[in-house]
Image: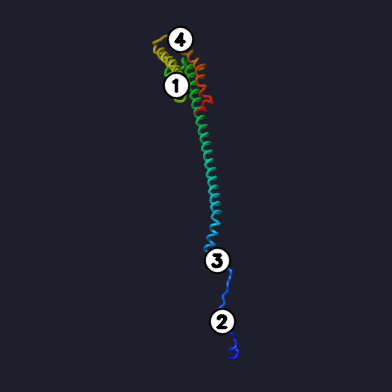
Amino acid sequence: MDLNTLAHAPDVLNTPPMVFVTNAMPPSGKGWWDTICEGARAIVPFAVVYVAWQQWKLSTRQHDLQKNQLKLSEEQKQIARGKLKLEVFEKRYELYKSFKDKINEFRSNIFKESYDNLKNVSNSLLAMSHEFIFIYDAEVFLEVNTIMESILMLVSSRRKYEDSEIEHDDLMNEASLCGSIIINFLVNIFPNLVKPFLNLEELDRL
């Protein structure tokens, strides 16, 4: 480019700078921070609802968990109560049957066994009789003690006979009297006495 052409060219150096305007500014002349704050304020209610919903879900799960725990606890109590009833029934029946069988053994051998053997049987009966106060009640215990008096009296008569303190006829009379009392106890008194305690409805009160 020659000097003449350059002289007629626009004065670039004296041309004012151009300003480019864009739409990047927030509307209504608001700043970015104001816009962000307005957006946040619009979101807050939804966030509160969401948090409340999550808390409700958590509370519902906890409530269901507590219900299940209470249900499980009640089921465990029922199982424990059922086991207790079964254990009590078994102990009561076992004591009833053992005591009855031991009395029949004693009655059948009153003249067959030696005094020492009869004494051992009566001692076993006496030990079992003390258990009735714990497994049954005072009434049953008193009745059992009453029959034990007849058994011990018969054992004493047997000893007296072996020591020649009484005659054979006296022993037979004593055996007949005590035997009748024992049979009546085994057949009539004892079964009716323990029957309510071997009733499942009675055990439900435990």
Residue 144: image quadrant is top left
What distance separates the C-alpha of mark 3 from that of mark 4? 129 Å
- At mark 4, the secondary structure is helix
Q: Amino acid at mark 4?
A: Asn
Where residue 148 is drawn, which disc sits there?
A: none
Residue 29: numbered disc = 3
N-term-proximal mark, 3 vs 2: 2
Comparing marks 2 and 4, which lies closer to the viewer? 2
Q: Quadrant of residue 146?
A: top left
| Most foreground residue, 74 or 188 | 74
Please say if 31 is above or below 110. below
Q: Please say if 187 is above or below 28.
A: above
- Earlier in the chain: of badge 4 and badge 1, it is 1
User: Which numbered dot is residue 138?
Assistant: 1
Work out whether residue 93 or residue 31 is closer to the camera in this orientation and state it.
Answer: 31
Q: CA distance from mark 4 to mark 1?
A: 31 Å
Q: What element does badge 1 sit on?
A: helix
Residue drawn at the location 58% of the way across and 74% of the way down: 20
> Can residue 114 be seen in this snapshot?
no
Which one is in front, 21 or 90? 21
In the displayed orientation, state which residue is furthest to the front. Answer: 28
Q: Which residue is mark 2?
A: 15
Q: What's the residue at 52%, 22% (across, down)?
A: 196
- In this rendered view, identify the residue nearer to me: 179 or 133: 133
Q: Which residue is mark 4?
A: 173
Q: Closer to us: mark 3 or mark 4?
A: 3
Residue type at mark 1? Ala
Q: Position of residue 36 (x, y in %)?
A: 53, 61
Spatial CA distance of label 2 from label 4 is: 154 Å
Nearer the observer: mark 4 or 1; the answer is: 1
The spot of residue 78 in percent (x, y) is 52, 34
Name the N-terminal-most of marks 1 and 3. 3
